[in-house]
Each structure stands twice: as structure tokens, then as C-alpha cells.
Amino acid sequence: ALKARVQTYFEGARADWLDRIRPQKRGDFRKQVNSWWNNLTEGQRTVTGIIAANVFVFCLWRLPGMRRIMFTYFTSDPSSRALCSPMLLSTFSHFSLFHMAANMYVLWSFSSSIVSLLGCEQFIAVYLSAGVVSTFVSYVAKMATGKFEPSLGASGAIMTVLAAVCTKMPEAKLAIIFLPMFTFTAGSALKAIIAFDTAGLALGWRFFDHAAHLGGALFGMWYVTYGHELIWKNREPLVKAWHEMRTKNTGKGGG
């Protein structure tokens, strides 16, 4: 991460120097895109790649020749012949445009808070893990109830993000996009969401995959309370081994 930041700094300095010495084209599209990108927060830049991946998978659903592959690998179902890869791939999969837009809007809205809380590297690790954990909880619930229905969407992972932010900042004020005049605390929102999904799971509602939502929320609460200390801060041996392996490979290549 430090290497990338230093490289970005020098690239930005070089770009500013080139802008001063060469004539500018009016209405330069690339300059406008760079200006927009530079005005984004670190969190918004981090989730841009996740949003792009979701849009790409959404486009694949529109291709008739891809339907069989999409149902096999991009929907999670404990009765499917593919069990492991869909636990992650289904997190990036949406069949409905409204479903994808709603999930990506929530992710974009909470991106700055969660990345400032965890950092971009830890956020990516938690987000991908949350997709797998929430899908696993969904598998368990489907096996227990005998209702084998395919599920897809980023809702479980996004619930982890939302729960993590609400747990660390319970007094933060939130509002619903269509009703901005009504505000409520993040802690109250988290309690309401958990209560709703618990009721949905107990009563067998089929509005959403309530098990995945509940699993994602509980994972987010657990991670910011205990997981950061137990997992992320104890990863030093793994990081050292990785750097030693990279150093040895570099030395062999140089020889």
C-alpha cells in the first residue's frame, strides 16, 4: 500500500508538471475523468472496482448463452453441483437492475466510513470473507428448513459493512434516501435490521435471503469487536513469509 501511495504521488506530480508545460485541450474528457477520480474519497475509490465487477456480472446475465453458467456458478444453492465457488461469486451477482442499484448505493454510501475504519486492504479482505460467511449461513438455513432455492446478490456482504459501521459509530445519524426528513441513529437502524431478518428467518418469509443478511450482520459486529484483534493484528507471520518468498523469487530472477 505504501509503495502504491508513493507511486501515485510521483505520478500526480508528473501529471501536474506536464499540464503546465503543454497546451490544454478544451473539454478534455480524460482530464474531467481524472478530476472526478481525484475528488473521490479513498473508500469510494476502493469500492469502484467492486461496483464495476457487479456491473460486469449483471451484463453477463443478459447474454442467453451464459445463463447455464450463471445459474451454476453465480447463484448459491446447497443442492447445486457447485458449492464452493458460488459462495463468493454469487456476492457479485445480480439479476435485477433495481437489486443491484440498491446494493451498490448502500455500499457507496458506507464506503468512506468503512475504509477509514479498516483501511482499504482490510476492507477488501473483510468484504470477500463476508460474502462467503453470509452464503454459508444461508446454506445452513436452507439445509435446516429443506427449502433449496438459489440466492444471489451482495446484500450479505453489504450487511457486514453496515453492521460494522453501525457498531463502531452507533450515534451516527442515518436517513432513508426517499425519506430524508426522517433521521435515526445507526445503532437503532442496526437493531431494527437484525430484528426484521430474525423475524423473517423464524417465520419463513421469502422477501429476501434473511439468513444471509443476518449472518452478514452478525459477522460484521463480531469482526469490529473481536476479529480485528484476533485476525488482522496477528497476521504478521504470514506477511513476513510472503515477503521472504517474494525476496527469494526476486533474487533468483536477478541471478
Image (spheres, helix red, strand yellow):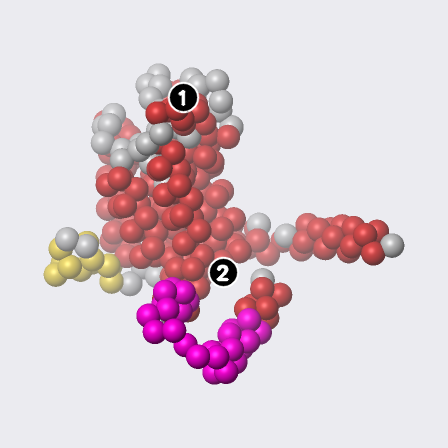
Q: Quadrant of the N terminus?
A: bottom right
Circle 1 is placed at which residue position? 68
Circle 2 is placed at which residue position? 119
Visible residue check, residue 195 = no
In three-dimensional space, the C-alpha distance between marks 2 and 1, rounded to whole angstroms, equals 37 Å
**Which mark, residue 212?**
none
Residue at the extreme bottom:
20
Q: Earlier in the sequence, mark 2 or mark 1?
A: 1
Judged from the image, the secondary structure of the residue bearing numbered disc 1 is helix
- Residue at the image position 34 percent from the left and 55 percent from the top: 108
Main secondary-structure element of the magenta-colored stretch: helix
The image quadrant of residue 38 is: bottom left
Amino acid on which the number 1 mark rests in the picture = Arg
Give the camera-side residue of 177 and 212. 177
**Chain part drawn in magenta:** 9-34
- Residue at the image position 48 percent from the left and 43 percent from the top: 128
Amino acid on which the number 2 mark rests in the picture = Gly
